[in-house]
Image (spheres, helix red, strand yellow):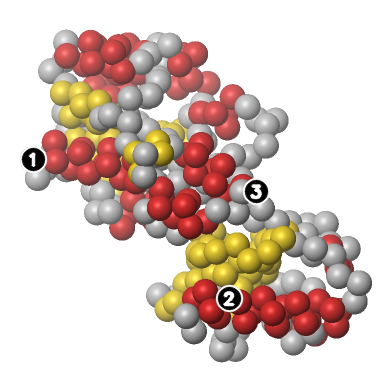
Amino acid sequence: MLVFKSIENIPKEERGYSVAIGNFDGMHLGHQSVIEIAREKSNNSFVGVVTFEPHPRQYFQKNQPIFRLMKSETRKRFLDSFGIDALFELPFDSSLANLSPRDFIETVLLERLNVKNIVVGPDFRFGKNRTGGVEDLVRICSKHNIIVKIIDKQKKDSVILSSTNVRDLLRAGDFKNAEKMLGHKWLIKGKVISGDKRGREIGFPTANMEVQDFMEIKFGVYAVKIEIEGYIYNGISNYGIRPTFDGEKLLLETYLFDFSKDIYGMDIVVSFVEFIRDEKRFDSVDELKKQIDLDIDKTIKILGS
């Protein structure tokens, strides 16, 4: 998959795509439907995705809690797996934010990308102050012979597929229903960092990752799957601040079953399967160890190993 982080100097041979446009935060089943329809409209030609970085809401609400379901790198990972030919990740800055709806279409989509087909969801907004809606998109594009397809709201088990609904499920610890809406497990991809070795000292060495730049989930213990260099392992993760050790920094600590390799500095993917329990402070390390043993037994039953 080709990745373009600017609309400047895009080669002519990389223009003329059928594109899906949106933020695609979480890459849920509704997003996947938009992309699949863009593929159908391409008539076996090139299929692209036009998205924005940072998320426009993040750009305008810099002081608000982080809400994103995934980092841009994780979004790219999913798009690549869907067989997209090109990703146009437009820098969302003041110049883009201040374009009128017409200028966005004529300057970005037509002049720079020369798109042939556009597919968006029903709530797509664009242009300065989000003044452009799907009706404006159809009206302006029709004057330039650009075909626009607006897909209906997508549902799963009568619930509307949306990033907001997925966030609500994750915050509640309902990862099973979140997975149904996403079409995949919610995951965190990152680099293993060196920790304080407390897990190793109590008999449960962990792979530690900093978690930032996306929404906070419920603090607690989770049954997880871990991908390392293409191999999948079972494990258990604690997402939180480790109150038993007076921790303050938010970390994801993952104990991999039957695993002893040195993976410091390596990128791993932790996929969340099921919430086990809330994070809590224990009166002693021995009490914590006993609870971890119980958590592991429960996780093994959940993961089937």
Q: Is residue 164 above or below residue 73?
A: above
Q: CA distance from mark 3 to mark 1?
A: 41 Å
| 296 vs 8, nearest the viewer | 296
Circle nearer the N terminus (1, 2): 1
Residue at 37 percent of width and 24 percent of height: 124
Q: Nearer the viewer, mark 3 or mark 1?
A: 3
Which quarter of the picture shows residue 229?
A: bottom left
**Viewer can see residue 112:** no
Residue sitting at x 58%, y 76%? 299
Three-letter code, disc 1: Asn
Q: Where is residue 117 drawn, in percent x and y?
A: 18, 29
Q: Disc 2 versus disc 3: distance between alpha carbons?
A: 22 Å
Q: From the viewer's perspective, tell me whether residue 237 is left or right of residue 101.
A: right
Residue occupied by mark 2 = 299
Which numbered tag is attached to residue 216?
Answer: 3
Relative vertical location of residue 116 with respect to residue 159 in this rendering, above or below = above
Q: Is residue 302 visible?
A: yes
Q: x, y percentage for residue 211?
A: 64, 56
* For residue 207, above or below residue 164: below
Q: Which residue ends up furthest to the left in the rendered image?
A: 43
- Image quarter for residue 66? top right
Residue for badge 1: 43
Furthest-front residue in this view: 158
Left or right: 190, with 112 as reference point: right
Horizontal arrangement in the rendering, residue 17 relative to residue 120 (left or right): left
Q: Residues within 10 Å of mark 3 (few under 14, many from 20)?
A: some
Identify residue type, mark 2: Thr
Task: Tell me the SS state at disc 1.
Answer: loop
Give the amino acid type for the residue marked by disc 3 in the picture.
Answer: Glu
129 in relation to 219, above or below = above
In the image, which disc is placed on residue 175? Answer: none
User: Residue at coordinates 16% horizontally, 10% vertically from top-left?
Assistant: 143
